[in-house]
Image: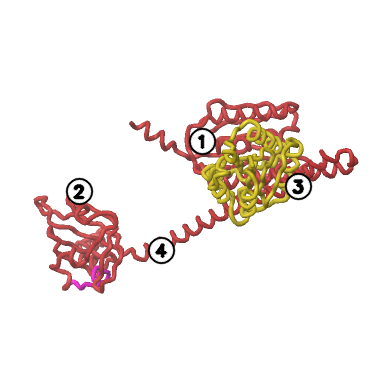
């Protein structure tokens, strides 16, 4: 089982957001498959049962465990120590951004009101984290 | 009072009986002690305030009897200040005869003999327990108020945030409809969807302004020298670039400088000049002026336009949030701009007001009373 370069895991409790991101990915990354879960427990379960995805898109404010809690737990597992995790959130508060990086996020994307801009941004970060950036293939070692 | 009467009164008030009466009846505790702090005089108020009678107090050591304590200093340190300078004042906590403590506002003066040698001191003490309690009560209310305000601000911040997510969905999905189903929608449907989009945009703008307003209230001011003329120029030029079809003349007095927070002042000037632009954009030969003048010894800054103006009857309502005096189609806006200006100016210790008449343009004046804290100390060195 190797890292899955085509899988994207999205953790967000909003169906609206999921549809928006799914549509963006369908247009810009038809090669990718997006799997979505609505909370931290389901996210951790998903990661247990699947090879590391190419990217994890993680919302900040979630019911139960919040984004940084989830992120710390993801990082605690060897298989996902280096999996790119991008926070995808409506908050652009400095304190939230710092907390995200502190917990081990690789990037922080603001859910801008301007959807067109947001879709462009999603496209750009996915291109970087999937096509440009290299992560160690932990599972093949 | 004729001269004889005056003399008679003076003769009486110079008697030791009268002076004794004054000392005895005055509301403040007055007592004296010698150089060794042995009490040598004790008035009636001292009996009442400390609970010790004159007989009990005289001849006792004041430190042992009254157990004075100072809040932020030692008794010895303050005593040496007294003997060095001849005078001391401050707040002292004493203990009454019954063991209860109280706070007193105290001043102490060194008494000297005919040769100028220190003889002892006279102390005047006023019980401020009630005053202190009232101040503490007041502080408690002030703290509570500050906490409530903070809560309210963070509440308005999170509300604004929570409003944005559903709004984003409204706008987003409307745009998706237009993009993904363009061939299935007729013109009417597209127009309706367009209205959803512009409604969302409008609300988004209001949320932005609300967030700005709450951010400005919470923000700490960082003072520096600001060239308001340059700021005005920049703001004006941006407006010209955004709207090249509109021709407005700018008359900006050069080198108008103030001390303030650059970011906040830029917001205020942007709003004032933005308003001037908006309300004179339909006026032929439109002019926007920025400058400073002197009013009653106070420097007053102004932004003036020759646009549509407003009825002075609304002058005091102008700066309330969400107050609008024009329809959206006449002049678009959220009605928060001037509330933001007011908050910025008030944060600078100034006031803002406006003068206008319908059809005669408007002038917005403001003052600023921030002193350059950091620079001032630098100048002195």
Q: Kindly report the secondary structure that dominates the magenta region of the rendered protein.
A: helix
Side of B340 relative to B186 (left or right): left
Looking at marks 4 and 1 on the same chain, the residue that comes earlier in the sequence is marked by 4
What x and y, as percent, mark residue B264?
A: 55, 38
Q: Are marks 4 and 1 on the same chain?
A: yes
To which chain does the residue with label 3 belong? B
Foreground residue among B265 and B122: B265
Q: Are marks 4 and 2 on the same chain?
A: yes
Instruction: Kindly give the residue lying farthest to the left in the view shown.
Output: B115
Displayed quadrant of residue B240: top right
What x and y, as percent, mark residue B112?
A: 13, 53
To which chain does the residue with label 4 belong? B
Disc 3 designates what residue?
Answer: B170
Disc 4 designates what residue?
Answer: B134
Q: How is the image coloured?
A: by chain
Foreground residue among A42 and A12: A42
Q: Are marks 1 and 3 in contact (CB under 8 Å)?
A: no
Chain identity for the colour red used in the image: B
Looking at marks 2 and 1 on the same chain, the residue that comes earlier in the sequence is marked by 2
Q: Are marks 4 and 1 in contact (CB under 8 Å)?
A: no
Q: Which residues are magenta?
A: B46-54
Disc 2 designates what residue?
Answer: B85
To which chain does the residue with label 1 belong? B
Q: Is residue B121 above or below residue A97?
A: below
Disc 1 designates what residue?
Answer: B299
Classify the position of the N terminus of chain A by image quarter.
top right
Q: Residues within 10 Å of mark 3 (few under 14, many from 20)?
A: some
């Amino acid at each position: 089982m190797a890292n899955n370069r085509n899988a994207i895991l999205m953790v967000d409790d909003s169906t609206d957001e999921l549809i928006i991101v799914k549509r963006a990915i369908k247009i810009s990354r038809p090669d990718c498959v997006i799997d979505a879960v609505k909370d931290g427990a389901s996210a951790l379960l998903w990661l247990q049962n699947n090879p590391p995805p190419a990217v994890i898109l993680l919302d900040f404010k979630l019911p139960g465990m919040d984004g940084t809690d989830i992120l710390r737990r993801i990082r605690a597992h060897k298989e996902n120590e280096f999996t790119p995790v991008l926070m995808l959130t409506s908050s652009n508060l400095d304190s939230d951004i710092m907390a995200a990086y502190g917990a081990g996020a690789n990037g922080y994307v603001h859910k801008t009101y301007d959807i067109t801009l947001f879709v462009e941004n999603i496209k750009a970060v996915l291109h970087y984290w999937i096509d440009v950036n290299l992560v160690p293939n932990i599972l093949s070692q | 009072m004729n001269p004889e009467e005056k003399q008679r009164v003076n003769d009486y008030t110079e008697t030791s009986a009268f002076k004794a009466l004054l000392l005895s009846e005055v509301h403040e505790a007055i007592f004296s002690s010698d150089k060794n702090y042995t009490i040598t005089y004790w008035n009636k108020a001292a009996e009442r305030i400390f609970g010790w009678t004159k007989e009990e107090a005289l001849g006792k050591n004041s430190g042992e009897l009254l157990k004075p304590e100072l809040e932020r200093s030692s008794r010895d340190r303050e005593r040496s200040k007294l003997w060095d300078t001849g005078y001391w004042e401050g707040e002292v906590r004493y203990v009454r005869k019954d063991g209860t403590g109280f706070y007193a506002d105290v001043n102490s003066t060194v008494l000297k003999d005919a040769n100028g040698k220190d003889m002892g001191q006279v102390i005047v003490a006023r019980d401020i327990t009630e005053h202190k309690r009232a101040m503490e009560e007041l502080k408690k209310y002030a703290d509570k108020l500050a906490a409530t305000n903070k809560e309210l601000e963070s509440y308005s911040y999170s509300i604004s945030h929570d409003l944005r997510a559903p709004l984003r969905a409204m706008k987003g999905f409307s745009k998706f409809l237009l993009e993904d189903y363009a061939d299935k929608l007729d013109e009417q449907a597209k127009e309706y969807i367009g209205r959803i989009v512009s409604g969302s945009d409008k609300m988004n703008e209001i949320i932005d302004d609300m967030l700005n307003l709450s951010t400005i209230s919470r923000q700490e001011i960082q003072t520096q020298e600001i060239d308001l003329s340059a700021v005005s120029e920049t703001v004006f030029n941006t407006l010209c670039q955004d709207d090249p079809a509109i021709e407005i003349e700018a008359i900006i007095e050069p080198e108008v400088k103030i001390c303030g927070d650059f970011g906040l002042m830029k917001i205020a000037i942007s709003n004032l000049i933005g308003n001037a632009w908006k309300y004179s954009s339909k006026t032929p030969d439109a002019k926007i002026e920025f400058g400073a003048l002197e009013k009653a010894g106070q420097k007053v800054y102004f932004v003036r336009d020759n646009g549509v103006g407003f009825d002075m009857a609304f002058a005091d309502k102008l700066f309330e949030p969400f107050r609008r005096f024009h329809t959206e189609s006449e002049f678009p806006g959220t009605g928060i701009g001037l509330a933001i200006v007011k908050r910025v100016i008030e944060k600078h210790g100034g006031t803002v007001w406006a003068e206008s008449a319908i059809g005669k343009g408007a002038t917005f004046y403001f003052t600023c009373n921030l002193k350059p804290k950091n620079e001032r100390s630098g100048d002195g060195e």
